[in-house]
Amino acid sequence: MIDWINNAIAGLSAQEQFALFGLLKILVAVFAIVLPLVAYSVVAERRISAWIQDRVGPNRVGIPFTNVRVWGLGQPLADGVKVLLKEDFTPAHVRTAYFWLAPMVAMVPALLTLAVIPFGSVLGAQPMVMADLNVGILYTFGITSLSVYGIVLAGYASNSKYPLLGGIRASAQMISYEIAMGLSVIPVFLLVGDLNLGQVIAYQAGGAWLVFKQPLAFAIFLIAAFAETNRLPFDMAESESELVGGYHTEYSSMKFALFFLGEYAAMVAVSAMMVVLFFGGWTLPVAGLNQPATSLGVGVLQIAVFLAKVIVLMAVFIWVRWMLPRFRYDQLMQLGWKRLVPLALANIVATAAVLFWQSTKS
Amino acid sequence: MIEGVAFYILSTVAVLGALLAVSRRNLVHGVFALLLFFAALSGLFVMLMADYVAAVQVLVYVGAVGILQLFAIMLTEHVTGDDLRRLGARGWFWGLMLAVALPVVLLLPPLLNGEPPVPPAAPQSTARQLGSQLMEHYVVPLEVLALLLTGALIGAVAVAHGPEKDPPGKDRPA
Amino acid sequence: MTLNHYLVLSAILLGIGLLGVLTRRNIIVVLFSIEILFNAANLNFIAFWRFGPNPEALMGPMFALFAIAVAAAEVAVGLALVIAVYRHFKTVDLEKLDTLREP
């Protein structure tokens, strides 16, 4: 079987191989990994929140048409059916074209970000990254900055008060925290000396993970990530107790679900970025997992290591959401501009000074 | 072949986006058209092998400038961006004439001289080379730029802040 | 694709930008048009670099990067001015802002 596959692959030209494996990677990564991860993080959110609040949470849905309950793990299926079958109501006062466009714009950037993330070393001869860009990190920041348009567009398209307020809040909040986020990773690239994300992982495989070398950068990045994904304590665009539901007040059914899933997809994307930048990507400093895989089994294991790290960070996102209250809007801006940006700048200067001192010493 | 198709699609999107941006009555529609224009230009930069500039284009223009403009529109006049007045300025006819004439004049030399001798070299502009160039040959402009950006940041805050209305010391509303 | 293709595109974009600057009355649209002008110029820088004789010097991308940074500063200050003007005159119509004009 494997020989047959190998022979079939060897018969293709380099371009055909690139196209085939590129398509395969996109299909598998999006439909077999990211979307299930998103679906189950919704369940995880509900179970963890229930656990924190001393409730039970959704534990009923199992395998359909049987009596087997697997701790409520069938819940995404039930949620999906519910969301698709609900009435898709479009209010009369909305701007229809933008109203339809907004949920798509909200979902797409998160998935696009994943294109440059190296989620494993190699499987066979194929590098486990969809697009190995020289300017990988700039690309991720460029795409992340697009995610605000989904929210602003929704606020504008809904043509009513609360969504618009949510949209305005989101625009100011996300542009402010993007600055802090961008500044916080500069020390990482001062250390690594390359913008390619694969090189960042290679650097960490050769020494300590960057979270230990740059704890301040990681802290700033993490805080900014909460703001960029619109999660509590920074969910000013949504804030259901002030703005009803913020930008998605007027949305229902599958359009609402796209916003909802977009938020979780953004969490997956930003967690994956943090894993690559600060937690060594697919490497693990035990049992030779630091080196690119030589066999299929090790390659799969490294992908599993990467996913495990992503899941741990997702759990942190969920945990923080249920532990902290929402910030006030002016507090949010104060924190972003007067605390995080100067701290990030100081961190850059300090890192550059240490690197300069080291280079003069040797 | 593929390159030609990509070029024509991207340039059509760019021209249409720019035309819509300057001609739409509703400013919010205008911003979204402008975003299309920026994105298409970023694609053209990729075609010209300037991947770093393309990424910066997306980051700065599509990501930041567009949002700033939306924010400014929503803070001024109609939140929804509808502009209900007459669109054209006084003397729009001469403006139109000039806007048509200038590109034509600019294009005369290259079009009359025919095809320039094109060296089909494929330059590699990696971030590393750009960085070392910035630090070696362009240090002074870089520092001036840093000063300019700081000045712009402070200036923008000072200009947009306006006169203080509330007496100091009172709690600001959330 | 040759250099001339890019030059024609850039000239058309420049024309559209000029059209907006010269014929619209809304300050914000004029700012849009200035952005279009900047971008048309950047396209020319990159195109001349790509088809020029000395691509290793990276003059084109460098100039484009500086232009983008300056444009970002321009947008920030420009929009702050728009907000200040709006607060003072309650309009963003350029033809109403003529208080410096001789009566």
Image (spheres, grey):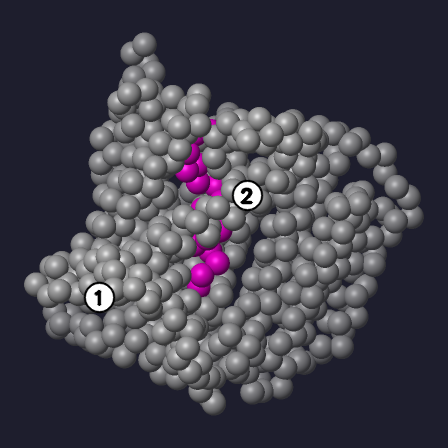
Q: Which mark is residue B66?
A: none
Q: Quadrant of residue A46?
A: bottom left
Residue at the image point whose x is 71% and y is 37% from the top? C50
For the question of whether residue B159 can be seen, the reply is no
The C terminus of chain B: image quadrant: bottom left
Circles 2 and 1: CB atoms closer than 8 Å: no
Q: Is residue A117 magenta?
A: yes
Q: Is residue A299 above or below residue A241?
A: above
- Which quarter of the picture shows residue B169? bottom left
For mark 1, what is the residue? A60
Which secondary structure, mark 2?
Answer: helix
Distance of label 2 from label 1 (alpha carbons)? 35 Å
Nearer the camera: disc 2 or disc 1 = 1
Query: What residue lies at 25% left-to-right and 71% top-to-bottom?
Result: A239
Please state which amino acid type lies under the numbered disc 2: Leu
The residue that appears at 45% across and 61% down in the rendered structure is A107
Tag 1, which chain?
A: A
Q: Position of residue B165 (x, y in %)?
A: 24, 76
Q: Based on the picture, tell me whether residue A271 belongs to the magenta stretch.
A: no
> For the image shown, how many numbered marks are present on the structure?
2
Give the main secondary structure, helix, strand or loop, of the magenta stretch: helix
Residue, far bottom:
A92
Which chain is indicated by disc 2?
A
Question: Residue sitting at 78 percent across and 32 percent down?
Answer: B120
Q: Could you say where residue B25 lies in the image, as x and y percent from the top left? A: 60, 80
Circle on res. A24: 2
Which residue is at the front of the view, C69 or A253? A253
Query: Magenta stretch?
Result: A106-122
Q: Earlier in the sequence, mark 2 or mark 1?
A: 2
Tell me the quarter of the image containing the N terminus of chain B. Answer: top right
What is the crowding at mark 1: few (fewer than 14 residues within 10 Å), some, or many (at least 20)? some
Is B108 left or right of A107, judged from the image as shown?
right
